[in-house]
Image (spheres, rainbow, N blue to C red):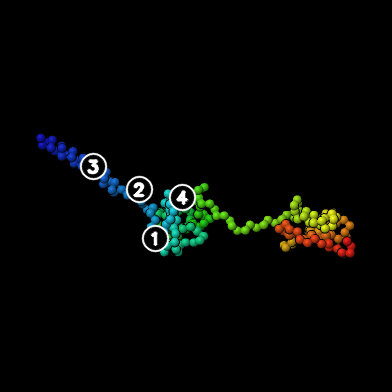
């Protein structure tokens, strides 16, 4: 009888111990994903992760703790550990409350984002007009020949010489029966200026 009581007591103790262990273990375990990945609000974090959603680092906005490190030419990011900070390839400029502050030049800010990264900003600067070609079809030489032909009634026979300057291009055209060539003033934007005879007006 005593032996049975002792066995029953032992079994009760074992069952009690087994029943309490999982609860204690689950209480002791830290909540998944709530480790050092949290960025304090004092650093003004925003976004779902950097360089992409779910990443441990986050973009940082302006706050008393970050204002000294913000730069128009760089992105400021906060990372919970050294490894994630170094993986971004920027410069670690400070460590605030265990968070590494990383400055990433805007030229490299899309590193690691892949094809889903933000679209590059459109270039709104006015495009420079391409300089018009001098020779060849549609060139200034052809335009000047046509202009001189119009003025002289179709007497142009060819180009005598071309003189270039930064401001304009002078194209001299030979005309049948003329003692001197005609000068055609052309501009690098493709427009034609004045056309004039370079010899004596009386010889025309």
Between 40 and 184, which is closer to the camera in this rendering?
Answer: 184
Residue behind mark 3: 19
Q: Dot 4 lies on which element?
A: loop
**Circle 4 crowding by C-alpha within 10 Å: few under 14, some 14–19, many from 20:** some
Q: Position of residue 152 (x, y in %)?
A: 84, 57
Q: Residue at x 50, y 50 (%)?
A: 117
Q: Position of residue 74 (x, y in %)?
A: 50, 59
Q: Is residue 52 visible?
A: yes
Q: Sequence-wise, which precedes: disc 4 or disc 2? A: 2
Structural distance between the alpha carbons of marks 4 and 2: 20 Å
Q: Dot 2 lies on which element?
A: loop
Task: Using the image, tell me which numbered label, if any, was put on residue 32.
Answer: 2
**Circle 3 crowding by C-alpha within 10 Å: few under 14, some 14–19, many from 20:** few
Q: Residue at x 75, y 59 (%)?
A: 192
**Circle 1 crowding by C-alpha within 10 Å: few under 14, some 14–19, many from 20:** some
Marks 3/2 in contact by CB < 8 Å: the verdict is no
Q: Quadrant of the C terminus?
A: bottom right
Q: Sequence-wise, which precedes: disc 1 or disc 4? A: 1
Q: Quadrant of the N terminus?
A: top left
Q: Residue at x 35, y 48 (%)?
A: 32
Q: Sequence-wise, which precedes: disc 3 or disc 1? A: 3
Q: Position of residue 194 (x, y in %)?
A: 78, 61
On the picture, is 20 further left or further right than 120? left
Residue behind mark 1: 42
The residue sitting at the left extreme is 1
Task: Using the image, tell me which numbered label, if any, was put on residue 52.
Answer: 4
Marks 2/1 in contact by CB < 8 Å: the verdict is no
């Amino acid at each position: 009888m005593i032996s049975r009581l002792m066995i029953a007591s032992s079994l009760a103790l074992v069952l009690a111990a087994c029943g309490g262990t999982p609860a204690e273990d689950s209480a002791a375990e830290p909540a998944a994903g709530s480790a050092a990945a949290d960025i304090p609000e004092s650093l003004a974090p925003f976004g779902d992760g950097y360089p992409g959603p779910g990443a441990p680092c986050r973009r940082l906005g302006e706050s008393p703790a970050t204002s000294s490190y913000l730069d128009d030419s760089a992105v400021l990011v906060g990372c919970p550990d050294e490894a994630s900070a170094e993986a971004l390839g920027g410069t670690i400029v400070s460590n605030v409350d265990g968070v590494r502050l990383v400055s990433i030049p805007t030229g490299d800010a899309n590193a690691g984002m892949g094809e889903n990264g933000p679209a590059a900003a459109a270039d709104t600067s006015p495009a420079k007009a391409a300089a018009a070609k001098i020779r060849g079809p549609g060139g200034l030489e052809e335009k000047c020949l046509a202009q001189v032909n119009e003025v002289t009634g179709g007497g142009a026979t060819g180009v005598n010489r071309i003189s270039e300057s930064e401001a304009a291009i002078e194209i001299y055209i030979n005309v049948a029966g003329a003692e001197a060539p005609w000068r055609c003033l052309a501009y690098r934007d493709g427009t034609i200026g004045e056309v004039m005879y370079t010899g004596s007006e009386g010889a025309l």
